[in-house]
Image (cartoon, rainbow, N blue to C red):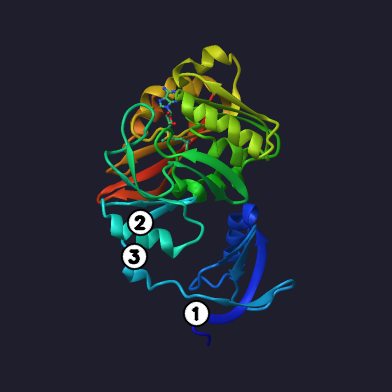
Amino acid sequence: MHAEGDELWGLRVDKRRAEEMRQDLIGRGLLERGYRPRSEGESLLLPLTGEVPGAERAVFTPFPPREDLARHELVGGIAILQEEDRAAAERILASRPSLHTVVVPTGPVSGEFRTRALKVLAGEPTTRTVVTEHGRRFAVDLAHAYFSARLSTERQRVHGLMAEGEEVCDMFAGVGPFAIALSDRASFVVAADLNPAAVSLLCENVRMNRCRNVLPVLADAAHLPGVFPRTFDRVIMNLPMESAQFLPAAFALCRPGGTIHYYALQEEEGAYLDRIRAFPVASVAERRVRSYSPGEWHAVYDIVVGE
Ligand SMILES: C[S@@+](CC[C@H](N)C(=O)[O-])C[C@H]1O[C@@H](n2cnc3c(N)ncnc32)[C@H](O)[C@@H]1O
């Protein structure tokens, strides 16, 4: 035991790859999560639960107990607090070296673009950050384009359902987390959004992830069948509040035997089945993705399109 902390094994990583390495170590159960990583110039020393090749001994400071920190959500280097409490924001900022900003929403997620106004409480005055998800990196701007890390498991599930070489259309792509996650199995992905800020970040993310088969499109999803008079193997509809009105476009875009993933917020099982069955459907399977608020959940309908 040292005055400033405890001596542990640590892994030295380049700061630009630190989040990716951190996620990798978490996945392998090797990150010692009770201690603060050490910042040293261009590198970060990540505390480990044991020795790994290339590890070195170093002194790490324990994080303050979790219960001292106000509840918050992490999106890349930004923490989102639920209340405007500047002292709490400063404590959160100090608790993790990977954080650069703490914000509080000043309104609900709203409007066509599904964005919300945010106020910076501590740290750098920005709402932009980079999120790492399953080895992919996404530039996001929480004030100007929708992004939620909560669907990352769902994106992996859809990825797991895909056959090699599928042609995919993501009708409400946002900054591209579905489109980019699916691109390595797809032959190509059309990724559309109505929000110019989202499409601009989507272009950045396509570049950053070196995707060569994702086509960002600034378009209203209702017009996609006219813009692309062809069909796709898989169509993603992630506009949970109101995507029923886009079902005609989705069925026009999906080939018979192809799959539409239709996301919806609902308060009862099967709430959208009648609207879906108004179209040619070979089969439909409904599942709960995650809870949203008491009594309301995010559901997905996997629809196999009929003849
Ligand atoms: C809930 S977000 C989903 C974004 C993305 N799929 C994700 O998982 O992060 C819905 C997106 O649909 C976009 N949008 C809303 N209406 C649209 C429309 N008529 N056509 C195309 N995109 C639309 C919004 O700008 C927003 O980025």
Identify which residue, 144 or 261, lies in the foreground. 144
Q: Are marks 1 and 2 in contact (CB under 8 Å)?
A: no
Q: Residue 164: in sight, yes or no?
A: yes
- Which tag is nearer the camera, tag 1 or tag 2? 1
Residue 72 numbered mark, or none: 2
Q: Which residue is mark 1?
A: 4
Q: Quadrant of residue 286?
A: top left
Query: Which amino acid, mark 2?
Result: His
Residue 69 numbered mark, or none: 3
Q: Residue at x 49, y 39 (%)?
A: 140
Q: Residue 258: in sight, yes or no?
A: no
Q: Quadrant of residue 271?
A: top left
Q: Earlier in the sequence, mark 3 or mark 1?
A: 1
Q: Is residue 297 above or below residue 216?
A: below
Query: Which amino acid, mark 1?
Result: Glu
Q: Assess disc 1: are there few (<14), some (14-19) or many (≥20) residues with their C-alpha within 10 Å of its C-alpha.
A: few
